[in-house]
Amino acid sequence: MKIFALTLMLVTVSTLFGGQAAASIYVGSWQVDDGPLWTTNPQVYSGVETAAFLFGGVPADYEISINGTNPNTISNTTWMDGWGVHAGTVASNVFAENFSLDLGAPGYATPGGNGSAFSAYVLDGLRGPQFTNYAFLRDNGVIPEPTTFVVWSLLGAMGLCGLRRKNRC
């Protein structure tokens, strides 16, 4: 009878609290021109690589948006500056969050030439707060849902009851 009651409680709690995944969490932002000066030949970064560099972790931990801090409007796009490709048209500087381009030798300025490098973190011609990228920790299941804690707690309680049958739970 006690096992039935615990099972019924487990099903009820799972129904009430289950099925709601955690949303991505805003962690910070940067402007493209916050990066190092292009003439120093800095490393080329995608949006997610920049987030990992600035906030820690690995690129797969992040989602990037150009739409602000609301996790419901994540665009999975990033502002980038390109060698010789600046804000001629704003749309030409929006790319997928994981895109970067570095033709030739490593570094933004080498070998040089229009369109030879694109980075989300470089001080070049794309300047100003309108070119801000917003970083979010990706909801990849690392943060357990409340149901997980409840289920494991109830299973632990059931196990303790089983171990302590002499004393009657």
Image (cartoon, helix red, strand yellow):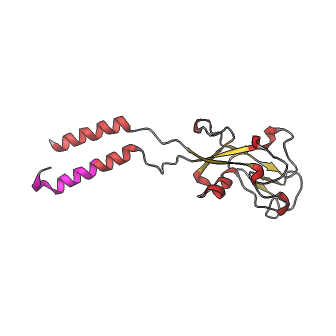
Residue in the picture at 75% in, 53% down:
34
Outermost residue, left side? 166
Whether residue 1 is situated above or below residue 53 in the rendered picture = above
Front residue of 35/149: it is 35
Whether residue 10 is situated above or below residue 163 in the rendered picture = above
- Describe residue 84's horizontal placement relative to residue 4 as left or right: right
- Describe residue 48's horizontal placement relative to residue 32 as left or right: left
The part of the chain drawn in magenta is 154-167
| Residue 73 visible in the snapshot | yes
Q: Quadrant of the N terminus?
A: top left
| Residue 94 visible in the snapshot | no
- Describe residue 122's horizontal placement relative to residue 163 as left or right: right
Residue in the picture at 46% in, 49% down:
143
Residue 87 x %, y %: 84, 42
Question: Is residue 166 located in the magenta-colored stretch of the structure?
Answer: yes
Residue 118 x %, y %: 79, 52
Residue 16 x %, y %: 35, 35
Question: Is residue 131 located in the magenta-colored stretch of the structure?
Answer: no
